Image (spheres, rainbow, N blue to C red):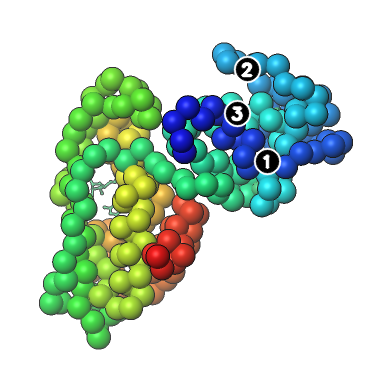
Amino acid sequence: VRKGKTPEEVVKKYLQKVKSPPEEDCTICMEPLGGPSGYKGPGVGPVSRAESVGRLAQCGHQYHFQCLVAMYNNGNKDGSLQCPTCKTIYGVKTGNQPAGKMEYHVIPHSLPGHPDCKTIRIIYNIPPGIQGPEHPNPGKPFTARGFPRHCYLPDSEKGRKVLRLLLVAWDRRLIFSVGTSSTTGESDTVIWNEVHHKTEFGSNLTGHGFPDPGHLDNVLEELRAQGITEDDVLV
Ligand code: NAD
Ligand code: ZN
Ligand code: ZN
């Protein structure tokens, strides 16, 4: 997104005009689309009646224009927008994963359930640091537990495809986030985002290991939900 593009301009780019709003509620603010946005916050300016409701161009869901702007302002303002109803992504979604390193190599062992191939080991390393404006508590430190984290994929055609998409997800800062760990309850810490990884190598005692026949397809689906598909690696 070019510098200086306002939240209103970003949102407008993904919208079509709606002449007469349907007799439905806006599912962001729960107020009727025929009336004003229920969102009253800082920086909410007046909008003309003709622009008060917009239809997202691809999925067709309709919202108050101001509600979409408020939603955009609550996110990391990366120039992308995600429909809160159907999760369709407009633009390129990025996350708030802190700085760190992603490395991978092939190891000469097979995973349970994948006897015919070797294994890709991914190593993620993220040091602790200070939260930025895109994090829940800007200026406050965050911890980073259990790094380096080692993850495994079969070195099969499909496993290599997942790896390529994970590299895109890493570049878009979507593999980890900063928040509260559901495992430990610790807040202000680095946590896995919405893409599952296998961190156990030889067994599946934790549920984060192999065999798991559906794993690669699940990950492809989770990546798709973040806006990452095969199209992203065919360039
Ligand atoms: P989380 O507990 O908030 O969970 C987020 C997602 O990660 C969930 O989908 C969950 O199913 C998945 N997940 C949880 N544990 C996982 C694991 N071991 N391997 C793969 N996926 C896992 O996320 P979190 O706090 O980032 O994950 C907790 C895991 O992080 C721990 O199990 C451990 O591996 C590591 N950790 C280690 C230490 C340490 O001191 N060594 C401390 C905290 C966390
Ligand atoms: Zn609304
Ligand atoms: Zn939608």
Q: Residue furthest left?
A: 108
- Residue at image x 15%, y 49%? 148
Residue underneath mark 1: 15
Residue underneath mark 2: 44
Please, what secondary structure does the residue beneath circle 3 have? helix
Q: How many other residues sit within 10 Å of disc 3, few (<14), some (14-19) or many (≥20)?
A: some
Q: Which mark is residue 8?
A: 3
* Distance from Cα at disc 1 to Cα at disc 3: 11 Å
* Distance from Cα at disc 1 to Cα at disc 2: 18 Å
* 112, 28: nearer the viewer: 28
Please, what secondary structure does the residue beneath circle 2 have? loop
Q: Are marks 3 and 2 in contact (CB under 8 Å)?
A: no
Q: Are marks 1 and 3 in contact (CB under 8 Å)?
A: no
Q: Residue furthest bottom?
A: 116
Q: How many other residues sit within 10 Å of disc 1, few (<14), some (14-19) or many (≥20)?
A: many
Q: How many other residues sit within 10 Å of disc 2, few (<14), some (14-19) or many (≥20)?
A: few
Q: Earlier in the sequence, mark 3 or mark 2?
A: 3
Quadrant of the snapshot with the C terminus: bottom left
Q: Are marks 1 and 2 in contact (CB under 8 Å)?
A: no
Q: Earlier in the sequence, mark 1 or mark 3?
A: 3
